[in-house]
Image (spheres, rainbow, N blue to C red):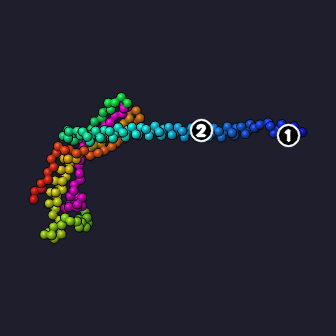
Amino acid sequence: MDQKVAAARQRGFSLLEVMIAITLFAFFITAFLTSQGYNVSDSALSEEQLVLQFLCERKINELVLDPPKFTNATANLKETKPFPEKEYENYEYTLEVKKLTLPDFTQLFSQKGGASAEASEGYDGDYYNDSNKGKRNAALEKMIFDELKKNIEKVVWQARVTVTNKETRYNFTLSTFLTNYAEKIQLNVGF
């Protein structure tokens, strides 16, 4: 009898135990392979973003070092070109150059017709003229702000570069301001 009990103990695993073990093993292998697939996918996407950012920064630096000639023809420039290097043949960049446009400064400082009555009454800045007893010298302010606006809009331009992978359609965009050194700044305000 002892031999029968010993033989029963050495029979091995039952079919149910083997099926449970295979199911658990398959579940853990599936979870592991799925997470590895996501890691590879995320790594490829990260690498793609780094390449796009590198190309975009390179194009922005080229613009800053060698800006385009600022004319009325380049005021609303938008062009798309491929990169000349063989390793970046799947990438293209779109360059947009625009004149900088500023808001109306009189509205910012609540001059006549520019802001609500509460904003105009509540303003107590340094722009008061004693001879007008609390009234701002709006004509002088307007002249100064208009001259400042004209100068800034002539000298500062906006540039935006968007690099796109032609296959995946992923893109990366950077913007900067360019200085038009050829323009003369007018500092005289007619007093």
Q: Is residue 117 visible?
A: no
| Picture disc at residue 123 | none
Does 128 lie within the magenta span? no
Q: In terms of depth relative to the viewer, which is nearer, 89 or 142?
A: 89
Q: CA distance from mark 2 to mark 1?
A: 39 Å
Q: Residue at x 15, y 49 (%)?
A: 185
- Residue type at mark 2? Thr
Highlighted magenta segment, given as a residue range: 88-115
> Which amino acid type is shown beneath numbered disc 1?
Val
Q: Residue at x 29, y 45 (%)?
A: 176
Residue lying furthest bottom in this view? 133
The reply, left or right, for residue 35 in relation to residue 53 is right
Specify which label sits upstream in the sequence, 2 or 1: 1
The furthest residue to the top: 86
Q: Secondary structure at mark 1?
A: helix
**Which residue corresponds to the image point at 22% horizontal and 65% vertical from the top-left?**
125
Q: Is residue 57 left or right of residue 8?
A: left
Q: Residue furthest left?
A: 191
Q: Which quarter of the figure has residue 119?
A: bottom left
Expressed as whole percent of the image width and height from the top left, the position of residue 15 reads 74, 36
Per the rendering, the mark at residue 5 is 1
Residue 129 location, quadrant: bottom left
Q: Quadrant of residue 191?
A: bottom left
User: At 31% across and 38% down in the image, what residue appears?
Assistant: 59
Q: Which residue is mark 2?
A: 30
Q: Secondary structure at mark 2?
A: helix
Where does the N terminus fall, quadrant-wise?
top right
Q: Nearer the viewer, residue 96 or 2?
A: 2
- Is residue 110 rendered magenta in the image? yes
